Amino acid sequence: MAPPVLATERLLLRPWRPADREGLWRMQSDPRTMEFLIPVPDRAASDQVADRAEAYFARHGFGLWVVEAPGVSDFAGYCGLVHVPYAEHFTPAVEIGWRFDPALWGRGYATEAAHAALAFGFDRLGLTEIVAITVPANARSRALMQRLGMTHDERGDFDLPTTPEGHPLRRQVLYRLKAGGAAQVCRRPPA
């Protein structure tokens, strides 16, 4: 199944193209992007991220879209929805996630793209809740989660089971958004 294209006022959330791999590697090799994430070691590993994103859409009908800002950037970053891939007290769950080119931070692209992804999840997929996770120190992502209307579930914070004991990125904060919450103000994806 081909991924749907979501349009907002300034952005397109679209399927991956071969040319996106260059932008993805540029973004993922920037230390600002990866400050609170496990580093991607090389171009081959970065390309695998795109391969997995394409395969995920084929299996599930949703996933991580490339975010394009027409007239500004063919690859501004990515944003979308994925199943949380590990067992934790809040799973099974669908998580919203994003990464954007630091050169484009501060323009509201992440908020705009995330609103479209949330609306898709609630309206098209019929999800009743979407979660987001990050490390406690990631103030930018936490602020975005709050702008989206997500609430921090302090009792839900947890240690990421895919990260080794003692690793600085192991502790995660959990944010939640129920259907009917802030998604009501989201711009609806095109029919």
Image: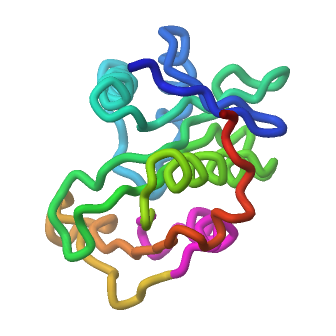
Q: Which residue is drawn at 54% across and 80% down?
A: 151
**Quadrant for the C terminus in the image:** top right
Expressed as whole percent of the image width and height from the top left, the position of residue 101 reads 64, 37
**Quadrant for the N terminus in the image:** top left
Q: Residue furthest bottom?
A: 155
In the image, 163: left or right of 24? left
- What segment carries the magenta color? 132-151
Q: Which residue is drawn at 64% across and 46% down?
A: 116
Q: Is residue 41 visible in the rendered structure shown here? A: yes
In the image, 104: left or right of 120? right
Residue 3's place in the image compared with 140, above or below, is above
Residue 178's place in the image compared with 31, above or below, is below
Residue 26's place in the image compared with 18, above or below, is below
Query: Residue 135's image quarter?
Result: bottom left
Q: Residue furthest top?
A: 18
- Is 157 or 118 nearer to us in this picture? 118
Q: Residue at x 54, y 17 (%)?
A: 20
Count the marks. Answer: 0
- Is 79 or 46 nearer to us in this picture? 79
Expressed as whole percent of the image width and height from the top left, the position of residue 113 reads 66, 45
The image's colour scheme reads rainbow
Q: Is residue 138 magenta?
A: yes
In the image, 33: left or right of 12? left
Q: Is residue 191 magenta?
A: no
Residue 179's place in the image compared with 58, above or below, is below
Expressed as whole percent of the image width and height from the top left, the position of residue 87 reads 15, 63
Expressed as whole percent of the image width and height from the top left, the position of residue 71 reads 84, 21
- Is 98 or 35 nearer to us in this picture? 98
Q: Residue at x 68, y 27 (%)?
A: 68
